[in-house]
Image (cartoon, rainbow, N blue to C red):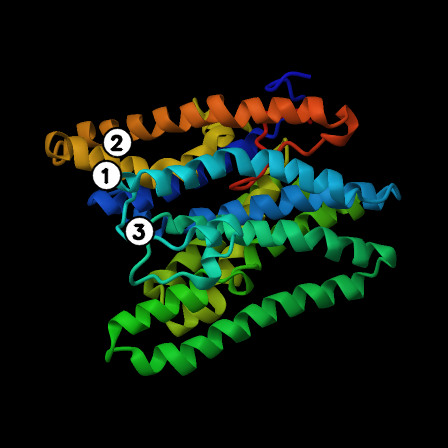
Amino acid sequence: MPLGACVNRLPGLDLLRAIAIVWVMIFHSFLIDGWGHFGGIEKHGWMGVDLFFVLSGFLIGSQVLKPLAEGKGLSFADFYLRRAFRILPVYLLVVASYFIWPSIREASGIQPLWQFLTFTVNLFIDVQHNLAFSHVWSLCVEEHFYLLFPLMAWWLARRPSFVKFMAVCVAVVAFGMLVRGFVWLHFMAPAKGVDQNSYGKYFLEDIYYPTWSRLDGLLAGVVLAVVKTYRPVLWGRWGQYANVVMLTGLVVVGLAILVFLDRTGFLATLLGYPLLSLGMGLLVFSGAQATSVLSRIKVPGAAWLAAASYSLYLSHKAVFHLVESSQGARLDGHGVLTFAGYALAVLLVGALLHYGVERPFLQLRQRFLKPARVAAPAIGGIASDASTEPA
């Protein structure tokens, strides 16, 4: 089946994924003094990454759990080959570009190459000196999840137990809260109002970037996948209330935004991420239902943005910098023209990477793996399969 011929399209998740990438890029546009004001919502664009996390948890959870629930077993080799074909080609090209042409870097300093090759940037980053390509931290979190989740799922599926599953979920959330709370109380609190550089450094390096602090969104997606896979009747029953769930999700995300008005405060640090992940999880559940308003809204270009979101995510900061350094004097301060100039450049580079690198390697994957082995749900996160892939 050719790319784009998927019969299991989930337009609601396409829309959510498109919203996530646009939200993140608008947030990062403040590297170039921003594209403008959008009612203040642009200040919370970092939350788009958490939406990506939930989508990824749902995709990978569904992909891994389905064969286990059917008693077919899980081929780890197939799973990791799928991930390699999906993630590595465009990622390695962008990494190489950052190191071969330092002029594209949005910041002067960058972490050592080996950390990008081992997906450990988020664990060792020096935010005071090496912020170039720092947004790769979220891909590192997803990579660690891809590496460990299949093993955990296989272990839990050997003797399925609701109590055991819930215990693992509670442990993951509680551990993240304990780590974040400990860092805030013992490191950030003493530095608050005294040493703002250290305060911000502790927040980014020890709370915001590390994998063990940011598993809430991925876990929310996995919970959705578990319900869909093991409790299909319950999934369908709640699916009848998809729009109510969507409205509830919007309310919860709104509450999370209020909590994160003080983004580095103790309450946000401790409770904000689980609350935000809950809200995003409700939105993803709604988006996965054909009866949802999210699935019925027709937004031109949303499906394409969803499909190209990985390339857009990896390249957009470098594109911002290149346009700013070459055309900033002409574009800046012209309102819509400024927005259009930077947006067009980002979309152009994203399209080149998507059509020139991503799609060819996905087609190669189809030929390399047996057809039955490339089947996947039509959903995705930052580096997950887009809904234009075969399903």
Give the alpha-carbon distance from disc 2 to disc 1, as whole Å.
8 Å
Between residue 194 and residue 173, name the one nearer to us. Answer: 194
The residue under label 2 is: 342
Between residue 248 and residue 286, name the one nearer to us. Answer: 286
Q: Is residue 134 left or right of residue 354?
A: left
Between residue 290 and residue 344, name the one nearer to us. Answer: 344
Q: Residue at x 29, y 63 (%)?
A: 128
The residue under label 3 is: 43
**Callout 1 crowding tier (Cα within 10 Å): few <14, some 14–19, many ≥20:** many
Above-or-below relation of 46 to 13: below
Give the alpha-carbon distance from disc 1 to disc 3, as whole Å.
12 Å
Above-or-below relation of 133 to 275: above
- Three-letter amino acid code at the position of disc 1: Trp
**Which image quadrant: the C terminus?**
top right
> Which element carries disc 3, helix, strand or loop?
helix
Q: Residue at x 29, y 60 (%)?
A: 129
